[in-house]
Image (cartoon, rainbow, N blue to C red):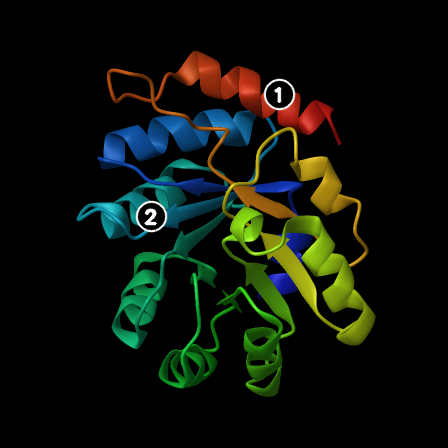
Amino acid sequence: MTSVVDVMNASPVIPVLAFESTEEAVAVCQVLYDEGIKVLEITLRHPTALEAISAVKTALPSDAIVGAGTVLSPELAKAAKNAGAVFGVSPGLTEELAHAVKALDWPFLPGVATLSEAMVARELGFTELKFFPASLSGGPSFLKAVGSVLPDLTFCPTGGVSADTAPDYRALKNVATVGGSWVTPRGKDGTIQLDIVRELARATIAAQ
């Protein structure tokens, strides 16, 4: 079974993906996978998100690690797991959600933005955390300070992370990977251009 540690160590970046159709999801994820980005976080922000997770899981090879993002409730967690998501990500954490994902035995990356939230998540049994929104919550300096008092926690900073700032985060001992949407930008016409995704994915992998 894939663990949260496995997920975080499998890619230098976890794309935070918001799709508008299953067709778009499969096409974009195929490009990302082909260029070496095999961890894919499909956010539950669109009515077709669960269908997209299932479609991407079916379309890509078995070593693709497809997860669900923006998991805000126990109901969404169960639905995402049933759709084929092998891990879940949330911008925050409640006790109800924590107990639910533990009961599902589902690898989960809950979000925190403060030291107190990190301590609560740790007490609830989570030592791998999403730091969100990273750029607005102290950036690399905050995570460096956290590492001095909670050295057993490992983070995936997300939110305002870019190709330029990602190396600053990954240089920290307590950061395993970063999350971001810069690899799949939408153009002025609202579409995701596959050739641009390919270029950005290649640049991201080459920078490691």
Q: Is residue 172 left or right of residue 76?
A: right
**Residue 48: image location, x then y, percent:** 20, 45
Check disc 2: other Cα within 10 Å, few if <14, some if 14-19, many if 20+.
many
Q: Nearer the viewer, residue 72 or 60?
A: 72
**Residue 175 visible in the picture:** no
Q: CA distance from mark 2 to mark 1?
A: 23 Å
Element class at badge 1: helix
Residue drawn at x 17%, y 49% is 47
Instruction: Count residues near mark 1 (Cα–Cα under 10 Å), then give few for <14, some for 14-19, many for 20+.
Output: some
Is residue 97 among what the camera can see? yes
Q: Nearer the viewer, residue 137 or 154?
A: 137
N-terminal label among 2 and 1: 2
Name the quarter where the C terminus is drawn.
top right
Mark 2 residue element: helix
Q: Position of residue 193 (x, y in %)?
A: 37, 16
Q: Which residue is mark 2?
A: 53
Left or right placement of residue 198 versus residue 4 in this view: left
Near-viewer residue (46 or 138) = 138
Residue at image x 73%, y 37%?
167
What residue does disc 1 label? 202
Q: Which mark is residue 184?
A: none
Q: Give the residue type that dot 2 points to.
A: Ile
